[in-house]
Image: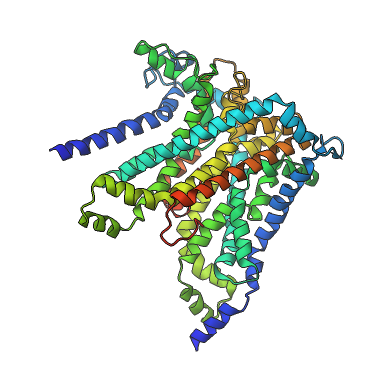
Protein backbone atom coordinates (compact mmCIF):
# COMPACT_ATOMS: atom_id res chain seq x y z
CA UNK A 1 0.00 0.00 0.00
CA UNK A 2 2.70 2.43 1.04
CA UNK A 3 4.79 1.40 -1.91
CA UNK A 4 2.08 1.91 -4.50
CA UNK A 5 1.29 5.30 -2.99
CA UNK A 6 4.94 6.26 -3.41
CA UNK A 7 4.84 5.06 -6.98
CA UNK A 8 1.70 7.04 -7.68
CA UNK A 9 3.27 10.21 -6.31
CA UNK A 10 6.19 9.71 -8.69
CA UNK A 11 3.80 9.61 -11.63
CA UNK A 12 1.92 12.65 -10.39
CA UNK A 13 5.18 14.52 -9.91
CA UNK A 14 6.50 13.59 -13.36
CA UNK A 15 3.27 14.54 -14.99
CA UNK A 16 2.88 17.89 -13.23
CA UNK A 17 6.47 18.92 -13.97
CA UNK A 18 6.13 17.76 -17.56
CA UNK A 19 2.88 19.64 -17.95
CA UNK A 20 4.36 22.88 -16.64
CA UNK A 21 7.28 22.44 -19.03
CA UNK A 22 5.21 21.90 -22.12
CA UNK A 23 2.44 24.33 -21.21
CA UNK A 24 4.21 27.35 -22.74
CA UNK A 25 4.28 25.55 -26.09
CA UNK A 26 0.62 24.62 -25.84
CA UNK A 27 -0.23 28.17 -24.83
CA UNK A 28 1.70 29.44 -27.83
CA UNK A 29 -0.22 27.19 -30.17
CA UNK A 30 -3.68 28.23 -28.96
CA UNK A 31 -2.78 31.89 -28.57
CA UNK A 32 -1.79 32.08 -32.21
CA UNK A 33 -5.51 31.66 -33.02
CA UNK A 34 -6.73 34.31 -30.58
CA UNK A 35 -7.61 37.93 -31.28
CA UNK A 36 -4.94 40.25 -29.90
CA UNK A 37 -6.85 41.58 -26.93
CA UNK A 38 -7.55 38.06 -25.79
CA UNK A 39 -3.94 36.86 -25.67
CA UNK A 40 -3.10 38.72 -22.50
CA UNK A 41 -6.66 39.72 -21.66
CA UNK A 42 -7.56 36.33 -20.32
CA UNK A 43 -5.67 33.36 -19.02
CA UNK A 44 -8.04 30.88 -20.63
CA UNK A 45 -6.15 28.47 -22.82
CA UNK A 46 -8.69 28.04 -25.60
CA UNK A 47 -9.62 30.98 -27.80
CA UNK A 48 -13.27 32.11 -27.55
CA UNK A 49 -13.26 32.37 -31.30
CA UNK A 50 -10.70 30.86 -33.61
CA UNK A 51 -9.27 33.38 -36.03
CA UNK A 52 -6.94 32.83 -38.95
CA UNK A 53 -6.04 36.50 -39.57
CA UNK A 54 -2.96 36.07 -37.46
CA UNK A 55 -1.61 33.52 -39.91
CA UNK A 56 -2.80 35.38 -43.01
CA UNK A 57 -1.40 38.74 -41.91
CA UNK A 58 1.72 37.36 -40.32
CA UNK A 59 2.48 35.42 -43.50
CA UNK A 60 2.84 38.67 -45.45
CA UNK A 61 6.18 39.26 -43.72
CA UNK A 62 7.89 42.44 -44.87
CA UNK A 63 5.21 43.10 -47.46
CA UNK A 64 7.68 42.71 -50.28
CA UNK A 65 8.81 39.29 -49.13
CA UNK A 66 6.41 36.89 -47.47
CA UNK A 67 7.00 33.84 -45.33
CA UNK A 68 6.63 31.70 -48.46
CA UNK A 69 9.94 33.21 -49.56
CA UNK A 70 11.52 32.80 -46.12
CA UNK A 71 10.38 29.18 -45.85
CA UNK A 72 11.73 28.40 -49.32
CA UNK A 73 15.01 30.07 -48.38
CA UNK A 74 15.26 28.04 -45.21
CA UNK A 75 14.89 24.84 -47.19
CA UNK A 76 17.37 26.07 -49.80
CA UNK A 77 19.87 26.67 -47.07
CA UNK A 78 19.18 23.73 -44.78
CA UNK A 79 18.71 20.81 -47.17
CA UNK A 80 22.03 21.11 -49.06
CA UNK A 81 23.80 21.76 -45.76
CA UNK A 82 22.35 18.56 -44.32
CA UNK A 83 23.16 16.49 -47.42
CA UNK A 84 26.72 17.81 -47.64
CA UNK A 85 27.29 17.30 -43.92
CA UNK A 86 26.23 13.69 -44.10
CA UNK A 87 28.22 13.04 -47.26
CA UNK A 88 31.47 14.55 -46.01
CA UNK A 89 31.13 13.24 -42.45
CA UNK A 90 30.53 9.70 -43.73
CA UNK A 91 33.66 9.71 -45.87
CA UNK A 92 35.82 11.17 -43.12
CA UNK A 93 34.39 8.88 -40.44
CA UNK A 94 35.03 5.88 -42.69
CA UNK A 95 38.63 7.02 -43.16
CA UNK A 96 39.18 7.31 -39.42
CA UNK A 97 37.31 4.16 -38.49
CA UNK A 98 38.78 1.72 -40.99
CA UNK A 99 42.20 2.77 -42.25
CA UNK A 100 45.59 3.02 -40.74
CA UNK A 101 47.50 5.99 -42.08
CA UNK A 102 50.38 8.10 -40.81
CA UNK A 103 49.51 10.39 -37.87
CA UNK A 104 46.02 8.93 -37.64
CA UNK A 105 45.91 9.16 -33.87
CA UNK A 106 47.10 12.75 -33.83
CA UNK A 107 44.70 13.77 -36.58
CA UNK A 108 41.81 12.11 -34.79
CA UNK A 109 42.66 13.89 -31.55
CA UNK A 110 42.85 17.14 -33.49
CA UNK A 111 39.45 16.50 -34.99
CA UNK A 112 37.98 15.75 -31.56
CA UNK A 113 39.55 18.86 -30.07
CA UNK A 114 37.82 21.04 -32.67
CA UNK A 115 34.58 19.95 -30.99
CA UNK A 116 35.57 22.39 -28.27
CA UNK A 117 36.64 25.20 -30.58
CA UNK A 118 34.21 28.04 -29.86
CA UNK A 119 32.43 29.39 -32.91
CA UNK A 120 32.90 32.87 -31.48
CA UNK A 121 36.66 32.63 -31.96
CA UNK A 122 36.61 31.79 -35.65
CA UNK A 123 33.62 33.79 -36.82
CA UNK A 124 35.35 37.11 -37.46
CA UNK A 125 38.07 35.81 -39.80
CA UNK A 126 35.52 33.54 -41.42
CA UNK A 127 33.35 36.55 -42.12
CA UNK A 128 36.28 38.40 -43.68
CA UNK A 129 37.24 35.26 -45.60
CA UNK A 130 33.71 34.84 -46.95
CA UNK A 131 33.57 38.51 -47.83
CA UNK A 132 36.78 38.27 -49.85
CA UNK A 133 35.48 35.18 -51.61
CA UNK A 134 32.24 36.99 -52.42
CA UNK A 135 30.20 34.43 -50.49
CA UNK A 136 28.54 36.81 -48.06
CA UNK A 137 24.78 36.96 -48.37
CA UNK A 138 24.74 33.53 -50.01
CA UNK A 139 24.16 30.07 -48.62
CA UNK A 140 27.70 29.05 -49.56
CA UNK A 141 28.58 30.32 -46.08
CA UNK A 142 26.75 27.27 -44.76
CA UNK A 143 27.16 24.69 -47.50
CA UNK A 144 30.91 24.99 -48.02
CA UNK A 145 31.85 24.29 -44.39
CA UNK A 146 29.37 21.40 -44.55
CA UNK A 147 31.00 20.00 -47.68
CA UNK A 148 34.40 20.10 -45.99
CA UNK A 149 33.26 18.25 -42.87
CA UNK A 150 33.43 21.14 -40.42
CA UNK A 151 31.04 19.44 -38.02
CA UNK A 152 33.26 17.17 -35.92
CA UNK A 153 30.25 16.15 -33.85
CA UNK A 154 28.82 14.10 -36.73
CA UNK A 155 32.19 12.63 -37.70
CA UNK A 156 32.67 11.46 -34.15
CA UNK A 157 29.15 10.05 -34.03
CA UNK A 158 29.65 8.06 -37.24
CA UNK A 159 33.13 6.86 -36.31
CA UNK A 160 31.65 5.41 -33.14
CA UNK A 161 28.97 3.74 -35.19
CA UNK A 162 31.30 2.32 -37.85
CA UNK A 163 33.53 0.89 -35.16
CA UNK A 164 30.59 -1.12 -33.97
CA UNK A 165 30.27 -2.84 -37.35
CA UNK A 166 32.39 -6.04 -37.40
CA UNK A 167 35.52 -5.68 -39.53
CA UNK A 168 35.10 -9.24 -40.81
CA UNK A 169 32.33 -7.95 -43.06
CA UNK A 170 34.84 -5.66 -44.76
CA UNK A 171 37.35 -8.47 -45.12
CA UNK A 172 34.93 -10.83 -46.77
CA UNK A 173 33.68 -8.10 -49.09
CA UNK A 174 37.27 -7.45 -50.06
CA UNK A 175 37.69 -11.10 -50.99
CA UNK A 176 34.56 -10.77 -53.10
CA UNK A 177 36.32 -8.05 -55.02
CA UNK A 178 35.07 -4.90 -53.35
CA UNK A 179 37.44 -1.94 -53.12
CA UNK A 180 37.66 0.56 -50.28
CA UNK A 181 34.91 2.72 -51.72
CA UNK A 182 32.46 -0.05 -52.62
CA UNK A 183 32.88 -1.56 -49.15
CA UNK A 184 31.64 1.71 -47.73
CA UNK A 185 28.72 1.88 -50.16
CA UNK A 186 27.64 -1.75 -50.10
CA UNK A 187 28.54 -2.92 -46.60
CA UNK A 188 28.76 -0.06 -44.13
CA UNK A 189 26.17 2.38 -45.39
CA UNK A 190 23.21 -0.01 -45.47
CA UNK A 191 24.00 -0.95 -41.87
CA UNK A 192 24.36 2.67 -40.80
CA UNK A 193 21.03 4.01 -41.96
CA UNK A 194 19.74 4.73 -38.42
CA UNK A 195 22.92 6.60 -37.49
CA UNK A 196 22.80 8.57 -40.72
CA UNK A 197 19.17 9.48 -40.12
CA UNK A 198 19.88 10.73 -36.62
CA UNK A 199 22.82 12.77 -37.85
CA UNK A 200 20.66 14.26 -40.62
CA UNK A 201 17.86 15.10 -38.18
CA UNK A 202 20.15 16.86 -35.77
CA UNK A 203 21.85 18.83 -38.50
CA UNK A 204 18.46 19.78 -39.96
CA UNK A 205 17.18 21.11 -36.66
CA UNK A 206 20.36 22.91 -35.68
CA UNK A 207 20.72 24.58 -39.05
CA UNK A 208 17.02 25.40 -39.24
CA UNK A 209 17.13 27.11 -35.85
CA UNK A 210 20.51 28.74 -36.36
CA UNK A 211 20.33 32.45 -35.71
CA UNK A 212 23.83 33.74 -34.95
CA UNK A 213 25.48 32.64 -38.20
CA UNK A 214 22.50 33.56 -40.38
CA UNK A 215 22.32 36.99 -38.79
CA UNK A 216 25.96 37.61 -39.61
CA UNK A 217 26.23 36.09 -43.07
CA UNK A 218 22.83 36.77 -44.65
CA UNK A 219 21.95 40.45 -45.07
CA UNK A 220 19.38 40.93 -47.82
CA UNK A 221 15.73 40.39 -46.95
CA UNK A 222 15.29 38.52 -50.23
CA UNK A 223 17.53 35.75 -48.84
CA UNK A 224 16.22 35.74 -45.26
CA UNK A 225 15.45 32.39 -43.69
CA UNK A 226 12.40 31.85 -41.48
CA UNK A 227 14.45 32.63 -38.39
CA UNK A 228 15.60 35.95 -39.76
CA UNK A 229 12.14 36.73 -41.13
CA UNK A 230 10.64 36.10 -37.72
CA UNK A 231 13.14 38.37 -36.05
CA UNK A 232 12.32 41.08 -38.60
CA UNK A 233 8.59 40.72 -37.96
CA UNK A 234 9.26 40.99 -34.26
CA UNK A 235 11.16 44.24 -34.73
CA UNK A 236 8.77 45.75 -37.25
CA UNK A 237 5.45 44.69 -35.80
CA UNK A 238 3.24 47.37 -34.42
CA UNK A 239 3.36 46.68 -30.69
CA UNK A 240 -0.04 45.05 -30.60
CA UNK A 241 0.26 42.42 -33.33
CA UNK A 242 1.13 39.67 -30.92
CA UNK A 243 -0.94 36.98 -32.53
CA UNK A 244 0.84 37.45 -35.87
CA UNK A 245 4.21 37.00 -34.21
CA UNK A 246 3.00 33.94 -32.36
CA UNK A 247 1.53 32.50 -35.53
CA UNK A 248 4.78 32.91 -37.43
CA UNK A 249 6.71 31.46 -34.51
CA UNK A 250 4.51 28.40 -34.85
CA UNK A 251 5.30 28.27 -38.57
CA UNK A 252 9.02 28.51 -37.79
CA UNK A 253 8.84 25.67 -35.29
CA UNK A 254 6.51 23.38 -37.20
CA UNK A 255 9.03 21.54 -39.43
CA UNK A 256 11.20 20.69 -36.43
CA UNK A 257 8.29 19.58 -34.27
CA UNK A 258 6.91 17.39 -37.06
CA UNK A 259 10.32 15.82 -37.61
CA UNK A 260 10.70 15.24 -33.92
CA UNK A 261 7.42 13.43 -33.55
CA UNK A 262 7.89 11.54 -36.80
CA UNK A 263 11.35 10.28 -35.99
CA UNK A 264 11.61 10.34 -32.24
CA UNK A 265 13.55 7.17 -31.77
CA UNK A 266 16.37 8.45 -33.96
CA UNK A 267 16.76 11.50 -31.77
CA UNK A 268 16.99 9.52 -28.62
CA UNK A 269 19.36 6.96 -30.18
CA UNK A 270 21.52 9.61 -31.75
CA UNK A 271 21.87 11.54 -28.56
CA UNK A 272 22.53 8.47 -26.46
CA UNK A 273 25.33 7.14 -28.65
CA UNK A 274 27.25 10.38 -28.68
CA UNK A 275 25.06 13.10 -27.38
CA UNK A 276 26.07 16.68 -27.18
CA UNK A 277 24.24 19.94 -27.03
CA UNK A 278 20.76 20.40 -28.42
CA UNK B 1 46.68 -17.66 -44.52
CA UNK B 2 43.85 -15.26 -44.13
CA UNK B 3 45.00 -14.28 -40.66
CA UNK B 4 48.50 -13.47 -41.80
CA UNK B 5 47.07 -11.38 -44.62
CA UNK B 6 44.97 -9.46 -42.15
CA UNK B 7 48.01 -8.90 -39.97
CA UNK B 8 49.93 -7.56 -42.91
CA UNK B 9 47.16 -5.08 -43.66
CA UNK B 10 47.19 -3.91 -40.09
CA UNK B 11 50.91 -3.29 -40.07
CA UNK B 12 51.37 -1.30 -43.21
CA UNK B 13 49.80 2.05 -43.91
CA UNK B 14 46.70 2.34 -45.98
CA UNK B 15 47.11 5.67 -47.67
CA UNK B 16 43.66 5.55 -49.19
CA UNK B 17 42.44 6.49 -45.71
CA UNK B 18 43.99 9.90 -46.19
CA UNK B 19 41.89 10.31 -49.30
CA UNK B 20 38.74 9.69 -47.29
CA UNK B 21 39.62 12.20 -44.61
CA UNK B 22 40.75 14.78 -47.20
CA UNK B 23 37.50 16.82 -46.95
CA UNK B 24 38.06 17.26 -43.25
CA UNK B 25 41.72 18.20 -43.70
CA UNK B 26 40.69 20.92 -46.16
CA UNK B 27 37.85 22.11 -43.91
CA UNK B 28 40.08 22.09 -40.87
CA UNK B 29 42.82 24.12 -42.54
CA UNK B 30 40.54 26.59 -44.33
CA UNK B 31 37.60 27.07 -41.97
CA UNK B 32 39.07 26.30 -38.57
CA UNK B 33 42.86 26.60 -38.28
CA UNK B 34 43.23 29.60 -40.56
CA UNK B 35 40.46 31.61 -38.82
CA UNK B 36 41.86 30.69 -35.43
CA UNK B 37 45.32 31.96 -36.33
CA UNK B 38 43.93 34.96 -38.21
CA UNK B 39 41.80 36.12 -35.30
CA UNK B 40 44.87 35.90 -33.08
CA UNK B 41 46.79 38.12 -35.50
CA UNK B 42 43.85 40.51 -35.98
CA UNK B 43 43.65 40.88 -32.22
CA UNK B 44 46.87 42.92 -32.34
CA UNK B 45 45.60 45.22 -35.07
CA UNK B 46 43.25 48.08 -35.69
CA UNK B 47 40.99 46.75 -38.40
CA UNK B 48 37.71 48.26 -39.50
CA UNK B 49 37.35 46.38 -42.84
CA UNK B 50 37.53 49.73 -44.68
CA UNK B 51 41.27 50.00 -44.20
CA UNK B 52 43.93 47.33 -44.03
CA UNK B 53 44.72 46.00 -40.57
CA UNK B 54 47.41 48.09 -38.88
CA UNK B 55 49.51 46.63 -36.11
CA UNK B 56 48.95 48.28 -32.75
CA UNK B 57 50.50 45.74 -30.40
CA UNK B 58 48.62 45.05 -27.20
CA UNK B 59 46.46 48.14 -27.37
CA UNK B 60 43.20 46.22 -27.93
CA UNK B 61 43.80 44.04 -24.91
CA UNK B 62 44.87 47.03 -22.84
CA UNK B 63 41.74 48.96 -23.82
CA UNK B 64 39.46 46.03 -23.13
CA UNK B 65 40.85 45.51 -19.66
CA UNK B 66 41.37 49.11 -18.60
CA UNK B 67 38.95 51.45 -20.36
CA UNK B 68 36.00 49.37 -21.54
CA UNK B 69 33.45 49.31 -18.75
CA UNK B 70 31.15 47.21 -20.92
CA UNK B 71 33.68 44.41 -20.93
CA UNK B 72 33.64 43.97 -17.18
CA UNK B 73 29.87 44.26 -17.07
CA UNK B 74 29.44 41.63 -19.76
CA UNK B 75 32.09 39.41 -18.16
CA UNK B 76 30.21 39.61 -14.89
CA UNK B 77 26.86 38.87 -16.53
CA UNK B 78 28.29 35.97 -18.53
CA UNK B 79 30.02 34.42 -15.52
CA UNK B 80 26.82 34.58 -13.47
CA UNK B 81 24.83 33.20 -16.39
CA UNK B 82 27.18 30.23 -16.86
CA UNK B 83 27.52 29.60 -13.14
CA UNK B 84 23.75 29.61 -12.65
CA UNK B 85 22.39 27.98 -15.78
CA UNK B 86 24.85 25.11 -16.31
CA UNK B 87 24.71 23.55 -12.83
CA UNK B 88 20.97 24.14 -12.55
CA UNK B 89 20.32 22.57 -15.94
CA UNK B 90 22.43 19.53 -15.14
CA UNK B 91 20.96 19.04 -11.68
CA UNK B 92 17.43 19.10 -13.07
CA UNK B 93 18.44 16.78 -15.94
CA UNK B 94 20.10 14.34 -13.56
CA UNK B 95 17.23 14.45 -11.11
CA UNK B 96 14.59 13.68 -13.74
CA UNK B 97 16.79 11.01 -15.35
CA UNK B 98 17.19 9.28 -11.98
CA UNK B 99 13.43 9.23 -11.48
CA UNK B 100 12.83 7.93 -14.97
CA UNK B 101 15.42 5.23 -14.40
CA UNK B 102 13.39 3.71 -11.58
CA UNK B 103 11.42 1.07 -13.37
CA UNK B 104 8.28 3.01 -14.16
CA UNK B 105 5.84 2.84 -17.01
CA UNK B 106 5.45 5.37 -19.80
CA UNK B 107 9.15 6.24 -19.75
CA UNK B 108 8.92 6.96 -23.47
CA UNK B 109 6.07 9.39 -22.97
CA UNK B 110 7.79 11.32 -20.21
CA UNK B 111 11.06 11.38 -22.10
CA UNK B 112 9.28 12.95 -25.07
CA UNK B 113 7.56 15.46 -22.82
CA UNK B 114 10.81 16.61 -21.23
CA UNK B 115 12.79 16.51 -24.43
CA UNK B 116 10.37 18.56 -26.53
CA UNK B 117 11.55 22.04 -25.40
CA UNK B 118 15.14 21.06 -26.15
CA UNK B 119 14.69 20.42 -29.83
CA UNK B 120 13.89 24.07 -30.36
CA UNK B 121 17.31 24.97 -28.96
CA UNK B 122 18.25 28.61 -29.23
CA UNK B 123 15.61 29.40 -31.82
CA UNK B 124 14.07 32.81 -32.28
CA UNK B 125 10.57 31.33 -31.96
CA UNK B 126 11.33 30.20 -28.41
CA UNK B 127 12.81 33.57 -27.58
CA UNK B 128 9.56 35.15 -28.79
CA UNK B 129 7.60 32.81 -26.57
CA UNK B 130 9.74 33.68 -23.55
CA UNK B 131 9.24 37.36 -24.15
CA UNK B 132 5.46 36.91 -24.21
CA UNK B 133 5.40 34.73 -21.13
CA UNK B 134 7.51 37.02 -19.01
CA UNK B 135 6.50 40.49 -20.22
CA UNK B 136 5.24 42.87 -17.57
CA UNK B 137 1.68 42.19 -18.68
CA UNK B 138 2.55 38.79 -20.03
CA UNK B 139 1.06 35.42 -19.36
CA UNK B 140 2.88 34.62 -16.14
CA UNK B 141 1.94 37.84 -14.39
CA UNK B 142 -1.67 37.51 -15.56
CA UNK B 143 -1.67 34.07 -14.02
CA UNK B 144 -0.21 35.41 -10.80
CA UNK B 145 -2.84 38.13 -10.47
CA UNK B 146 -5.52 35.45 -10.35
CA UNK B 147 -4.02 34.33 -7.05
CA UNK B 148 -3.53 37.95 -5.98
CA UNK B 149 0.19 38.16 -6.50
CA UNK B 150 1.61 41.20 -8.21
CA UNK B 151 4.41 39.68 -10.31
CA UNK B 152 7.58 41.66 -10.94
CA UNK B 153 8.68 42.94 -14.32
CA UNK B 154 10.63 39.78 -15.14
CA UNK B 155 12.43 41.20 -18.15
CA UNK B 156 12.45 44.89 -17.29
CA UNK B 157 13.79 44.68 -13.77
CA UNK B 158 17.56 44.24 -13.47
CA UNK B 159 17.10 41.99 -10.48
CA UNK B 160 15.17 39.39 -12.47
CA UNK B 161 16.15 39.79 -16.13
CA UNK B 162 19.25 37.57 -16.14
CA UNK B 163 17.47 34.96 -14.08
CA UNK B 164 14.59 34.88 -16.57
CA UNK B 165 17.03 34.35 -19.45
CA UNK B 166 18.82 31.61 -17.51
CA UNK B 167 15.50 29.92 -16.89
CA UNK B 168 15.07 29.52 -20.64
CA UNK B 169 18.39 27.66 -20.75
CA UNK B 170 17.46 25.44 -17.84
CA UNK B 171 14.09 24.69 -19.43
CA UNK B 172 15.98 22.96 -22.24
CA UNK B 173 17.57 20.28 -20.12
CA UNK B 174 16.22 17.46 -22.31
CA UNK B 175 19.35 16.46 -24.18
CA UNK B 176 21.42 16.28 -21.00
CA UNK B 177 18.67 14.19 -19.47
CA UNK B 178 18.68 11.71 -22.36
CA UNK B 179 22.46 11.43 -22.02
CA UNK B 180 22.18 10.72 -18.31
CA UNK B 181 19.49 8.14 -18.97
CA UNK B 182 21.72 6.36 -21.46
CA UNK B 183 24.53 6.40 -18.92
CA UNK B 184 22.30 4.98 -16.21
CA UNK B 185 21.28 2.13 -18.49
CA UNK B 186 24.92 1.18 -18.98
CA UNK B 187 25.63 0.56 -15.30
CA UNK B 188 26.01 -3.22 -15.05
CA UNK B 189 23.21 -4.94 -13.19
CA UNK B 190 25.74 -7.15 -11.37
CA UNK B 191 27.00 -4.18 -9.40
CA UNK B 192 23.56 -3.58 -7.98
CA UNK B 193 23.07 -7.26 -7.23
CA UNK B 194 26.40 -7.51 -5.46
CA UNK B 195 25.54 -4.48 -3.35
CA UNK B 196 22.19 -6.00 -2.51
CA UNK B 197 23.87 -9.21 -1.37
CA UNK B 198 26.15 -7.19 0.86
CA UNK B 199 23.04 -5.68 2.39
CA UNK B 200 23.66 -2.13 1.22
CA UNK B 201 20.77 0.30 1.64
CA UNK B 202 19.24 2.05 -1.35
CA UNK B 203 20.75 5.35 -0.34
CA UNK B 204 24.18 3.76 -0.02
CA UNK B 205 23.84 2.06 -3.39
CA UNK B 206 22.94 5.40 -4.91
CA UNK B 207 25.99 7.17 -3.54
CA UNK B 208 28.51 4.35 -3.95
CA UNK B 209 27.42 2.88 -7.29
CA UNK B 210 25.03 5.04 -9.30
CA UNK B 211 26.72 8.39 -8.82
CA UNK B 212 30.34 7.20 -9.26
CA UNK B 213 29.45 5.25 -12.39
CA UNK B 214 27.75 8.29 -13.84
CA UNK B 215 30.58 10.76 -13.21
CA UNK B 216 32.23 10.46 -16.66
CA UNK B 217 28.96 11.52 -18.29
CA UNK B 218 28.55 14.33 -15.79
CA UNK B 219 32.02 15.56 -16.68
CA UNK B 220 31.28 15.40 -20.40
CA UNK B 221 28.00 17.27 -19.92
CA UNK B 222 29.54 19.98 -17.76
CA UNK B 223 32.24 20.74 -20.31
CA UNK B 224 30.00 20.80 -23.36
CA UNK B 225 27.30 22.86 -21.67
CA UNK B 226 29.86 25.24 -20.23
CA UNK B 227 31.45 25.88 -23.63
CA UNK B 228 28.05 26.48 -25.21
CA UNK B 229 26.80 28.73 -22.43
CA UNK B 230 29.82 31.01 -22.64
CA UNK B 231 28.82 31.75 -26.23
CA UNK B 232 25.05 31.97 -25.82
CA UNK B 233 23.56 34.80 -27.77
CA UNK B 234 20.13 34.33 -29.31
CA UNK B 235 17.88 34.41 -26.25
CA UNK B 236 19.44 37.46 -24.63
CA UNK B 237 19.75 39.23 -27.98
CA UNK B 238 16.16 38.68 -29.09
CA UNK B 239 14.38 38.93 -25.75
CA UNK B 240 16.15 41.80 -24.02
CA UNK B 241 18.96 42.84 -26.39
CA UNK B 242 21.31 42.91 -23.43
CA UNK B 243 19.13 45.26 -21.38
CA UNK B 244 17.77 46.57 -19.12
CA UNK B 245 20.85 48.52 -17.99
CA UNK B 246 23.10 45.85 -19.54
CA UNK B 247 21.87 43.31 -17.01
CA UNK B 248 21.68 40.58 -19.70
CA UNK B 249 24.62 41.85 -21.73
CA UNK B 250 26.13 38.44 -22.48
CA UNK B 251 29.62 38.26 -23.95
CA UNK B 252 28.20 37.00 -27.26
CA UNK B 253 26.17 40.20 -27.66
CA UNK B 254 29.14 42.41 -26.95
CA UNK B 255 31.23 40.45 -29.42
CA UNK B 256 28.52 40.71 -32.05
CA UNK B 257 28.10 44.46 -31.59
CA UNK B 258 31.80 45.21 -31.75
CA UNK B 259 32.45 42.99 -34.75
CA UNK B 260 29.34 43.30 -36.88
CA UNK B 261 27.71 46.58 -35.88
CA UNK B 262 30.76 48.76 -35.16
CA UNK B 263 33.07 46.70 -37.42
CA UNK B 264 35.89 46.90 -34.92
CA UNK B 265 37.29 43.60 -36.14
CA UNK B 266 40.65 43.83 -34.38
CA UNK B 267 39.07 44.76 -31.09
CA UNK B 268 36.44 42.03 -31.37
CA UNK B 269 39.10 39.47 -32.28
CA UNK B 270 40.93 40.33 -29.08
CA UNK B 271 37.65 39.87 -27.22
CA UNK B 272 37.12 36.48 -28.84
CA UNK B 273 40.58 35.34 -27.82
CA UNK B 274 39.97 36.43 -24.25
CA UNK B 275 36.86 34.27 -24.30
CA UNK B 276 38.82 31.40 -25.82
CA UNK B 277 41.48 31.58 -23.11
CA UNK B 278 38.80 31.68 -20.41
CA UNK B 279 37.06 28.64 -21.88
CA UNK B 280 40.35 26.73 -22.09
CA UNK B 281 41.20 27.70 -18.52
CA UNK B 282 37.82 26.67 -17.14
CA UNK B 283 37.93 23.40 -19.11
CA UNK B 284 41.40 22.67 -17.77
CA UNK B 285 40.25 23.42 -14.22
CA UNK B 286 37.27 21.10 -14.57
CA UNK B 287 39.45 18.36 -16.04
CA UNK B 288 42.00 18.79 -13.29
CA UNK B 289 39.41 18.60 -10.56
CA UNK B 290 37.73 15.68 -12.31
CA UNK B 291 40.50 13.24 -11.39
CA UNK B 292 39.25 13.63 -7.83
CA UNK B 293 35.61 12.95 -8.55
CA UNK B 294 35.43 11.05 -11.82
CA UNK B 295 35.44 7.30 -11.87
CA UNK B 296 36.56 5.35 -14.92
CA UNK B 297 35.94 1.66 -15.11
CA UNK B 298 38.76 1.18 -17.61
CA UNK B 299 40.84 4.12 -16.41
CA UNK B 300 40.43 5.74 -19.83
CA UNK B 301 39.38 9.18 -20.95
CA UNK B 302 35.98 10.33 -22.11
CA UNK B 303 36.86 10.04 -25.75
Residue in view at x 51 percent, y 70 percent: A186
A54 over A134 or under it: above or below: above
As drawn, the residue found furthest toward the left would be A1
Indicate the quadrant where residue A113 lies: bottom right
Residue in view at x 41 percent, y 21 percent: A50
Indicate the quadrant where residue B43 lies: top right
Indicate the quadrant where residue B270 lies: top right
Residue in view at x 48 percent, y 79 percent: A172
Horizontal and vertical percent position of residue A134: 78, 44
Q: Is residue B73 visible?
A: yes
Nearest the eye: A93 or A32: A93
Horizontal and vertical percent position of residue B136: 49, 15
Q: Quadrant of the N terminus of chain A?
A: top left
Q: Is residue A88 visible?
A: no
Horizontal and vertical percent position of residue B138: 47, 17
Nearest the eye: B209 or A196: B209
Q: Which scheme is used to colour this image of the protein?
A: rainbow
A120 over B166 or under it: above or below: below
Q: Is residue A79 left or right of residue B22?
A: left
Q: Is residue A138 left or right of residue A84?
A: right
Horizontal and vertical percent position of residue A29: 43, 28
Amino acid sequence: MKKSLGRLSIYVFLFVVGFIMVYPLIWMFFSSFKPNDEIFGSIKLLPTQVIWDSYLNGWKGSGQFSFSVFLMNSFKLVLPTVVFTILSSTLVAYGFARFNFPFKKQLFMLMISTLMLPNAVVIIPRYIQFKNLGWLDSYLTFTMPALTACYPFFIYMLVQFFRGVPKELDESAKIDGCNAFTILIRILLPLSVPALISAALFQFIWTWNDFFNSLIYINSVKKFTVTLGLRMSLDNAATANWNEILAMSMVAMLPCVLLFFGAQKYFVEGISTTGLKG
Amino acid sequence: MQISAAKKIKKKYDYVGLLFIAPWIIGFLVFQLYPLVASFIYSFTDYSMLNNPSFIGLKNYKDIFTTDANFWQSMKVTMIYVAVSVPLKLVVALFIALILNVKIKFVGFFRTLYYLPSIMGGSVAIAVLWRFLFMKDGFLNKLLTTINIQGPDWLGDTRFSLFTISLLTVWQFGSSMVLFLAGLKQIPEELYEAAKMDGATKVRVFFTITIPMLTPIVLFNIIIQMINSFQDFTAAFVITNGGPANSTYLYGIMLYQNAFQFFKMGYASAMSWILFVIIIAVTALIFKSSSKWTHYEDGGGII
